[in-house]
């Protein structure tokens, strides 16, 4: 299985970068995983709704260039479905069993994801109704992907 985490912006905080890199290393035992960092757009101070939507669409176009038609797309968005770790593991297994070779996890930038990108995703996932920095979500996601593989392989980690 191939997993791509497509996200906007670079991780600058060393503690986040170290955490993500550690989980990426652990995940590589189970799947091919890559992180695609795309440049995020500059946001004006006090942007209008129109400016936010325009930024989201520009960023969506950057994201779409990294998605292949046969990929399974999971967008991370506040409107998405919340899952337990076991349900998340089952979701990954189900995607694989349906013949998808690549899962693309999409993490938006500061303004979030465009509605068109969310609507065209195969699945929309939310970690919480709380709002988190998108850099922190990258750490959460990489940890949960690792946890999912541990669960699927009946390996001790999640107890």
Image (spheres, rainbow, N blue to C red):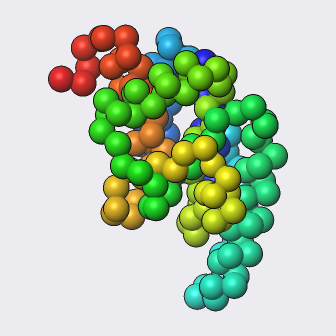
Q: Position of residue 16 (x, y in %)?
A: 44, 43
In depth, the one of 39 and 78 nearer the eye is 78
Q: Is residue 43 above or below residue 130?
A: below
104 sits left or right of 13 in the view: right
Count of numbered tags: 0
1 sits left or right of 58 in the view: left
Q: Is residue 131 above or below residue 153?
A: below
The residue positioned 77% from the left and 65% from the top of the image is 58
The residue positioned 69% from the left and 62% from the top of the image is 116
In depth, the one of 57 and 36 nearer the eye is 57
Q: Position of residue 62 (x, y in %)?
A: 78, 53
Q: Quadrant of the N terminus?
A: top right
The residue positioned 52% from the left and 50% from the top of the image is 124
Q: Position of residue 144 (x, y in %)?
A: 39, 34
23 sits left or right of 47 in the view: left
Q: Is residue 66 above or below residue 49?
A: above
The residue positioned 50% from the left and 12% from the top of the image is 29
Residue occupying the far front of the picture: 98
Residue occupying the far left of the picture: 159
Q: Quadrant of the C terminus?
A: top left
- Residue 48 sits in quarter: bottom right
Is residue 13 at all visible to an observer of this figure?
no
In depth, the one of 156 and 84 nearer the eye is 84
In depth, the one of 105 and 118 nearer the eye is 118
- Residue 100 sits in quarter: top right
Q: Position of residue 89 (x, y in %)?
A: 40, 27
Is residue 85 at all visible to an observer of this figure?
yes
């Amino acid at each position: 299985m191939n997993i791509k985490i497509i996200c906007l912006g670079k991780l600058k905080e060393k503690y986040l970068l170290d955490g993500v890199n550690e989980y990426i290393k652990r995940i590589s035992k189970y799947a091919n995983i890559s992180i695609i960092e795309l440049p995020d757009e500059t946001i004006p101070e006090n942007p209008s709704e129109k400016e936010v939507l325009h930024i989201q669409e520009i960023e969506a176009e950057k994201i779409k260039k990294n998605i292949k038609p046969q990929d399974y797309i999971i967008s991370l968005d506040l409107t998405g479905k919340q899952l337990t770790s076991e349900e998340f593991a089952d979701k990954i297994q189900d995607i694989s069993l349906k013949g998808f070779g690549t899962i693309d996890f999409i993490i938006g930038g500061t303004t979030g994801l465009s509605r068109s990108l969310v609507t065209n995703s195969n699945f929309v996932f939310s970690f919480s109704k709380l709002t988190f920095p998108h850099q922190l979500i990258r750490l959460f996601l990489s940890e949960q992907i690792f946890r999912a593989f541990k669960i699927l392989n009946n390996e001790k980690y999640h107890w």
